[in-house]
Image: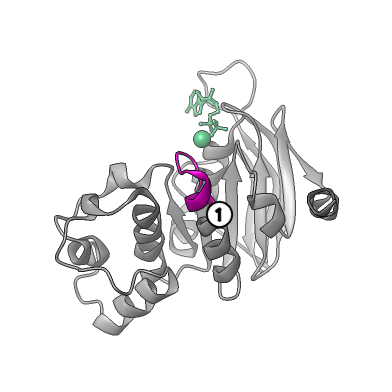
Amino acid sequence: MLYLKNVVYHPPATMTPILKEANLELAPQELGLIIGPSGSGKTTLLEIIAGLAEKTKGKIFWRDQELTSLELQQLGGLVFQFPQRHFCGSTILEELRLGHPEILSYRIKTALQEVGLEHIPLNQSPHALSGGQQRRLALAVQLIRQPNLLLLDEPTAGLDWSMRHQLAKLLAKLKGHWTLLVVSHDPGELFTIADRCWKIHQGHLVSLDTAMFKSQKSQ
Ligand SMILES: Nc1ncnc2c1ncn2[C@@H]1O[C@H](COP(=O)(O)OP(=O)(O)O)[C@@H](O)[C@H]1O
Ligand SMILES: [Mg+2]
């Protein structure tokens, strides 16, 4: 279980805090969705949960243990928005092995299977993949590390309708093994696969009823 308790983020450069007492609870194998317009603090919140930015106040717990930024870095795997911009391996295999050269090949195989990329040639450049495949590769890179929590920043941004749909299906499948927290300014099909949903409003996380979206979709 992930808990955020009164998390505040107030960098010195801003008049008002970007996050004001953000609270959240996410159970294992749930998909949490945070929506909000551009500039509302979604990426900042993910970076704090991933241990890449330091909150000003508040606490983050995994189960009953409060975690430091370093422990949060171990706990979470963050897939950036437009992850292909961060690829630095010259081949797909190199990309998957970055940071852990000792990784066993079955772990690589399993991660690729989980994202439906088991048939791609590993000696090809990651940039040769389609946009949808690049998202999947970025997910596999995180899955190899076996994080407890997968964090995804705008996973459907820039994809066409069919690729968005496929990605939502993949995330729904990954929920069987992993706990996911997704942020998006354009959630669309992500609503139907979310177990919990919040919107960021003036620095607060306001809980939304996911049952409502699902019944609206089916009408
Ligand atoms: N360290 C910082 N100092 C000043 N402003 C920041 C800092 N971090 C984020 N911001 C500002 O906070 C706002 C929210 O940013 P962001 O988290 O990227 O929003 P979103 O992902 O919802 O578009 C933006 O206006 C951004 O410029
Ligand atoms: Mg963002």
- Asked if 5 appears above or below 77 in the picture, the reply is above
**Of the residues shown, which amino acid type is indicated by label 1?**
His
Which residue corresponds to the image point at 64% horizontal and 51% vertical from the top-left? 190
On screen, residue 10 above or below 216: above
Residue that protrudes farthest toward the top in the picture: 15
Number of labels in the image equals: 1
Residue 49 x, y percent position in the rendering: 55, 50
- Which is nearer the eye, 210 or 145? 210
Q: How far across and how far down the image is residue 101, in percent?
A: 19, 71
Would residue 22 be counted in the magenta stretch? no
**What residue appears at the point 35 percent right and 72 percent down from the top-left corner?**
112
User: What is the quadrant of the N terminus in the image?
Assistant: bottom right
What residue would you read off at disc 1?
Answer: 165
Question: Is residue 69 positioned above or below 174 on the image?
Answer: above
Which residue range is magenta in the image?
A: 156-164
Nearest the eye: 119 or 26: 119
